[in-house]
Image (spheres, rainbow, N blue to C red):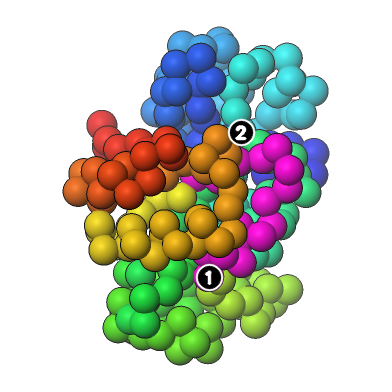
Amino acid sequence: FTAENVRLSALVDKGNSGVASGTGRRVSSTVSLWQGSLPSPATDGNYCVSKPAMAGRLRGVEIIAHRGASYDAPENTLSAARLAWMQGADALEMDVHLTGDGRLAVIHDEDLQRVAGVARKVSAATLAELKEADVGRWKGAAFAGERIPELGEVLATVPAGRRVFIEIKSGAGVVGALERCLAQHGPPPGRAVIISFDRQAARAAKQALPRFEVCLVVDT
């Protein structure tokens, strides 16, 4: 997202709960089935349409900020989450891994190499150790000093009426901590969706949190 434009990194058709995520031709084809064609992708590979055009052409579609406003801010950070809400996102998608001390770190990869240049495994470190890493500088000097947030910190940013999609990245072992976190920080079942590519993780999440929508993500 930007102030004048919205980049579509994930779309949810509210009518049938279908999900399309990603960029490029694959998203264009999926969107065209719902609302007609969109402009050609920008050079960064994301679709950009003006907000007035969005209102007219994407009626009934929920705009989800993938890893927060990750085009403009470091992915999966508090800056990315807050910016997504400022830019008008309907929902926020984030990734969670279980740390070595049983906490939920919001980060996509299993280690810090890509976002911090540190070869440290998330599962082998405590949350405090992970927070020592700078995960913002790679995106620009303005974000230097950004830290890996805990899931509860990101949930605290969610405005009334908005939703979150929590992707389990580290298997079914994360579910106990996720259950405790949602009980403590919310949001309620209607405003939080749990997703995962891991079938066992999705099954365990549904068993532990039956009131929450749980979706298995399939890569086609």
Q: Position of residue 205 (x, y in %)?
A: 32, 48
**Which quadrant holds residue 26?**
top left
Q: Is residue 137 above or below residue 168?
A: below
Q: Is residue 48 highlighted in magenta?
A: no
The disc at residue 166 is none
Q: The disc labelled 2 sits on which kind of residue?
A: Ile
Is 104 on the left or on the right of 40, as rendered?
A: left
Q: The disc labelled 1 sits on which kind of residue?
A: Glu
Residue 68 in view here: yes
Residue 80 in view here: no
- Residue drawn at the location 25% of the way across and 57% of the way down: 172
Please state, as top left, top right, bottom left or bottom right, where the C terminus lies in the image. top left
Q: Is residue 163 highlighted in magenta?
A: yes
Front tag of 1 and 2: 1
Confirm or deny contact between disc 1 and disc 2 (CB under 8 A): no
Q: Secondary structure at mark 2?
A: strand
Q: Nearer the viewer, residue 98 or 133?
A: 98
- Residue drawn at the location 51% of the way across and 21% of the way down: 13
Residue bearing the label numbered 1 = 150
Q: Secondary structure at mark 1?
A: loop
Q: Position of residue 73 (x, y in %)?
A: 64, 61
Write down the region rendered in magenta: 150-165
Q: Residues within 10 Å of mark 1 (few under 14, many from 20)?
A: many
Is 47 on the left or on the right of 16, as rendered?
A: right
Q: Position of residue 121 (x, y in %)?
A: 31, 79
Q: Nearer the viewer, residue 180 or 194?
A: 180
- Residue drawn at the location 68% of the way across and 64% of the way down: 79
Looking at the image, tell me whether mark 1 or mark 2 is earlier in sequence order.
2
Residue bearing the label numbered 2 = 63
**Which quadrant holds residue 184?**
bottom right
How far apart are labels 1 and 2 at the CA level?
24 Å
